[in-house]
Image: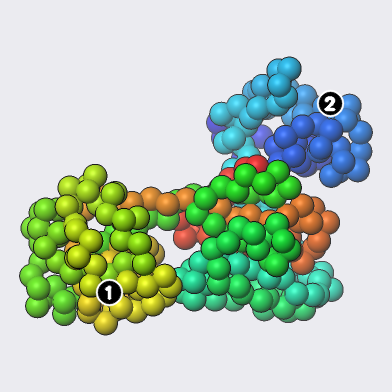
């Protein structure tokens, strides 16, 4: 369906978005400071205008239909883009001040976050960002961080999580290392090379075995619990390493070990606590990161709980 060719009431769209995020008409009503019947009527009117069903109603509650999920992608993208455009246009974000703590893995914090956050200095210079390099989801529940970027969906009910897509990873090495050690022709040949990995090689060995690479524990000649250190060990030419394609494909002197080798996928979740609904500074940073990360994984962001 061509959504852009259809005109509808933005209040109805806001009701749809809030209901999708909160999972119920009552939750949406609290967020929008209105009544549950009003939200229900707005959703019904939007469904009538579009000629589709957006939510399946049952005794267990509301469930987004496939059409609803598709529309949510577009609405979320439109809303985030409009927020940034309006902030640049009227400088309302100049009044948004305070600190926001963002946490992500050490590699993501060092290599990706600085680029994603750069527009923030223009649209909201009053916001100060503190980056916490960590993989602990407790950083949010214990209020040590405001926003987290994680590879697993949190199960804590008081957190809001949005799946932005999936990063792809592949096996990379420096051209100098491959010139010296030889370029593999098959997946089986890769197992004869030295590997750089994290402190627990078993985490990588199982998926590699499933992909036809019978790598052994003794193949891991260098390892680190720190992802940035592992990345630097790869660049120093110690061996083969599984790294995000968003880094490996653009790093000078680094190449994919075996062209055509299948990628591993790992999800990207943007997570925050419910203060997102009331804190403008957290909302500004959250929306900026959602847009930037979604562009990195090549898709529009999708809301999830």
Neighbours of disc 1 within 10 Å: few (<14), some (14-19), many (20+): some
User: In the shown orientation, is residue 261 left or right of residue 8?
Assistant: left
For numbered disc 1, what is the local secondary structure? strand
Give percent across and percent down for residue 291: 58, 59
For numbered disc 2, what is the local secondary structure? helix
Is 282 drawn above or below residue 174 in the view shown? above
Residue lying farthest to the bottom in this orientation: 236
Answer with the quarter of the image where residue 171 lies. bottom left
User: In the shown orientation, is residue 233 left or right of residue 135?
Assistant: left
Q: Are marks 1 and 2 in contact (CB under 8 Å)?
A: no
Is 81 drawn above or below residue 231 in the view shown? above
* Residue in view at x 65 percent, y 63 percent: 139
Is 272 drawn above or below residue 108 in the view shown? above
User: In the shown orientation, is residue 188 left or right of residue 278?
Assistant: left
Answer with the quarter of the image where residue 74 lies. top right
Give percent across and percent down for residue 248: 32, 68
* Residue in view at x 71 percent, y 18 percent: 58
Query: Looking at the figure, which quarter contains the N terminus?
Result: top right
Q: CA distance from mark 1 to mark 2?
A: 61 Å
Is 96 drawn above or below residue 58 in the view shown? below
Residue sitting nearer the eye, 287 or 2: 287
* Residue in view at x 11 percent, y 53 percent: 188
In this view of the protein, can residue 82 be seen by the observer? no
User: In this figure, which residue is indicated by the disc labeled 2?
Assistant: 41
User: In this figure, which residue is indicated by the disc labeled 1?
Assistant: 222
Query: Looking at the figure, which quarter contains the C terminus?
Result: top right
Residue sitting nearer the eye, 118 or 31: 31
Give percent across and percent down for residue 109: 52, 72
* Residue in view at x 87 percent, y 41 percent: 30
């Amino acid at each position: 369906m061509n959504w852009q060719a259809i005109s509808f009431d933005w209040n109805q769209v806001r009701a749809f978005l809030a209901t999708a995020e909160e999972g119920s008409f009552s939750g949406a009503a609290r967020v929008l400071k209105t009544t549950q019947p009003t939200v229900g009527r707005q959703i019904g009117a939007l469904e009538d205008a579009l000629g589709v069903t957006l939510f399946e109603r049952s005794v267990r509650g509301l469930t987004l239909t496939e059409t609803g999920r598709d529309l949510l992608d577009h609405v979320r993208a439109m809303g985030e883009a409009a927020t940034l455009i309006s902030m640049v246009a009227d400088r309302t974000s100049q009044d948004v001040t305070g600190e926001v703590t963002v946490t992500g893995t050490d590699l993501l914090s060092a290599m990706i976050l600085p680029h994603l956050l750069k527009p923030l200095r223009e649209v909201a210079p009053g916001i100060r960002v503190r980056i916490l390099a960590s993989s602990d989801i407790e950083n949010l529940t214990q209020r040590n961080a405001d926003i987290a970027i994680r590879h697993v969906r949190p199960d804590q009910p008081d957190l809001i999580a949005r799946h932005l897509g999936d990063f792809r990873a592949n096996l990379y090495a420096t051209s100098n290392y491959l010139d010296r050690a030889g370029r593999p022709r098959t997946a089986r040949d890769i197992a004869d090379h030295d590997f750089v990995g994290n402190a627990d090689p078993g985490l990588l060995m199982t998926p590699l075995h499933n992909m036809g690479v019978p790598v052994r524990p003794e193949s891991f000649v260098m390892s680190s619990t720190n992802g940035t250190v592992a990345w630097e060990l790869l660049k120093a030419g110690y061996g083969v390493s599984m790294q995000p394609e968003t880094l490996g494909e653009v790093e000078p002197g680094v190449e994919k070990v075996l062209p055509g080798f299948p990628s591993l996928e790992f999800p990207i979740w943007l997570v925050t606590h419910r203060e997102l609904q009331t804190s403008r500074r957290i909302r500004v940073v959250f929306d900026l990161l959602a847009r930037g990360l979604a562009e990195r994984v090549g898709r529009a962001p999708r809301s999830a709980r």
